[in-house]
Image: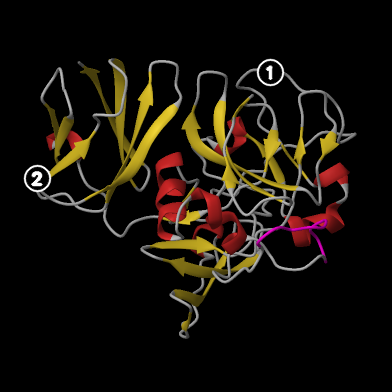
Amino acid sequence: MSRLSEIVFSGVVLFISGTAIGQQVSDASGNTYGTVTIGTQVWLNAGLKTTRFSNGDSIPTTYPATLPVDTGPTSIYQWAYNGDDSLAAIYGRLYTWYAVMDVRNVCPVGWHVPSTAEFGILTSYLGGVEVAGGKLKEAGYSHWLSPNTGATNETGFNGVPNGNRNLGGYFNDMGMVSDNWSSTEGSQGAWDFDLNYNTAATTSYDDPKTFAFAVRCLRNLPAETDLSSVTVFPVPADDYLVVDCHDISDLTYEIAESTGAIVQTGSLKAGQNTLAIEKLPAGVYIIRLFQSQKTIEFKFIKA
């Protein structure tokens, strides 16, 4: 069997508290994951463990694991925490953003690294950022430090505190934080999605791209679509912005300030979608639309 055909599905799906758990997926290194459906999204139920891209190419690491790396786009690396491969079975591996965004794809075939908008859909479905983290975290203290506030894992997401690797090559925060890359660039680097031991809330930060964080893969939408027909108006906009998706459905969006900060996220349906933007300060913004691994963006002015 080729690496590109190593996705295997079981025939059983169990429904628990609004989520579906069942399908089995393999990555290019042969690691197997369960899946969990949360709302309209299907996620792997563990952090990515692969040492290979989906085409079979190896993802480099360093020896020792604490060796500093270049700060530019050649920094395509992965590590087990502290270089201890035995930890990867529980916590997954840590990847630089340049590895995460390599065209060879770190996720299994048919899966991708989620955008901030897609993480936003997840937290919205779970009741908002103030409570979503607790529903995503593994309960108890087997891996999380006390107090592991609000942790119920009622979604089956199994969020564990994988920690991170910083610019100096030091590993930090295992037991305290689950740092996960998004595919969305920021003004300083790229955005992450975090679960924390001392709050039920989720957090997000714009971090350097050569930090190493975990990856939680999201299944692609069933069909790829040409997004070029989408239109955005009026420009300039006042209290409302209209996104006409025509016959395209299952889009997500994010609105970013000129600094790169994400100020609004959500989902879009086929036809015209009216977005309330009256609370945004006047200025220049970018709206990005996502479907699976396709993206299109528009610049607009808020009057």
Q: Residue furthest front?
A: 279
Please state if 112 lies on the left or on the right of 26 as rendered: left
Please state if 90 lies on the left or on the right of 230 as rendered: right
Q: Is residue 148 magenta?
A: yes
Residues under labels 2 and 1: Cα distance? 42 Å
Give the labeled residue for mark 1: 71
State which quarter of the image contains the C terminus. top left
Going by the numbered disc 1, the residue's amino acid type is Thr
Question: Which of the pair 162/228 is nearer the observer?
Answer: 162
Question: Which of the pair 253/108 is nearer the observer?
Answer: 253
Q: Which badge, 2 or 1, is on the more N-terminal residue?
A: 1
Going by the numbered disc 2, the residue's amino acid type is His
| Dot in front, 2 or 1 | 2
Residue at 86% x, 36% y is: 65
Q: Is residue 225 above or below residue 1?
A: above
Magenta segment's dominant SS is: loop
Give the labeled residue for mark 2: 246
Please state if 266 lies on the left or on the right of 110 as rendered: left
Please provide percent x and percent y for residue 214: 66, 46
Counting other residues with Cα less than 10 Å from the Cα at mark 2, is it few (<14), some (14-19), or many (20 or more)?
some
Q: Secondary structure at mark 1?
A: loop
State which quarter of the image contains the N terminus. bottom right
Residue 170 occupies quadrant: top right
What span is in magenta? 142-150
Marker disc for residue 96: none
Q: Secondary structure at mark 2?
A: loop
Residue at 81% x, 48% y is: 174
